[in-house]
Image: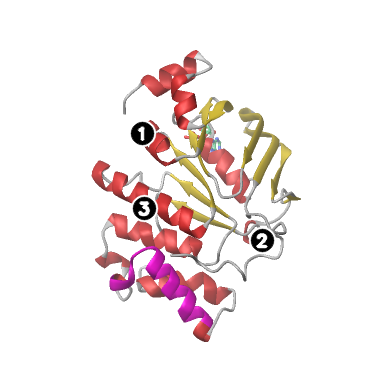
Amino acid sequence: MRIDMSSTNADAPAGGKRGEVNVDKVTCDFSGNRVLHETDLTVQAGEFFTLLGPSGSGKTTLLRIIAGLIDFTSGRVSIDGSDVTRLPTQQRDIGFVFQNYALFPHLTVAQNIAFGLKLRKVRGAALTKRVDEILDLTELGSLKDRHPSQLSGGQQQRVALGRALAQRPRVLLLDEPLGALDRRLRQDLGSEIRRIQQESETTAIYVTHDQEEAYILSDRMGVMEAGFIRQVGAPREVYSAPTSAFVANFLGETN
Ligand code: ADP
């Protein structure tokens, strides 16, 4: 299935895919501790890019900076060539999925998906059409009248993903979205996230500490350690030719 992208954001580069993200020399300090050191990163439009690294290496901080959720010390973030460093989150045209889904418990699946669209004044037939497209994309049609408490963890995450994609964001940010699920479900939902990302042609930046997930899902990945991105490349390249002892050791560990 193809989603109609014709009514999307006006900032999209002419003729090209939307959602290129540039992080330029971003430094972030928390209470005197430097947690990101002049970090540079380019994520191509339409790419599935994973930030992989151990706990505390700065993955979430970098993702939240791209989202506009935290102040940082210096540097710049741009999307499709426009500097968004000072733009509030709501104006960045991004969607999020985090580990703790936080769906609205009193709303049905369809109403959860419709929520953000209604805030943006999408109404009537356009609203119904978009909600149906998302139910189709996430294969949640048969569950559309259920409430979150009547869904499994994996189904809830699919609703969160659908809700994040409903407004056709340029960039989808995912922070350990499978972290609360068991291994089997993680694999299934991981492939589903990848399929949905490809069909919706959205750039995805995905945070995980799980090498296997990164290997299976990513077009490219960046391996982080202590506030530095140590290596960037396609998973196969990084695995076959780690450029540092840290990357070799980290990728050699099993979860
Ligand atoms: P990761 O996502 O790789 O686990 P984080 O980006 O969450 O890493 O954290 C990077 C570092 O920043 C850690 O040392 C963490 O303790 C610290 N940190 C994160 N958020 C805050 C905060 N709000 N205040 C102070 N320190 C923080």
User: At x 50% / y 59%, what residue is drawn?
Assistant: 200
Kind of residue at disc 1: Glu
Q: Residues within 10 Å of mark 3 (few under 14, many from 20)?
A: some
Compared with 88, 181 (above or below) is above
User: Residue tagged by mark 1?
Assistant: 212
- Which comes before the other along the chain, label 2 or label 1? 2
Residue 194 seen in render:
yes
User: At x 41% / y 23%, what residue is drawn?
Assistant: 251
Q: Residue 147 carries which label?
A: none
Local secondary structure at mark 2: helix
Instruction: Looking at the picture, tell me which residue is in the foreground, 158 or 133.
Output: 133
- Which comes before the other along the chain, label 3 or label 1? 3
Percent x, y for residue 85? 72, 48
Percent x, y for residue 197? 47, 54
Percent x, y for residue 4? 54, 69
Percent x, y for residue 18? 63, 55
User: Residue tagged by mark 3?
Assistant: 192
The Cα–Cα distance between marks 2 and 1, rounded to whole angstroms, is: 34 Å
Compared with 77, 168 (above or below) is below
- Which comes before the other along the chain, label 3 or label 2? 2
The Cα–Cα distance between marks 3 and 1, rounded to whole angstroms, is: 15 Å
Q: What stretch is highlighted in magenta?
A: 126-142
Residue 104 seen in render:
no
User: Residue tagged by mark 2?
Assistant: 91
Local secondary structure at mark 3: helix
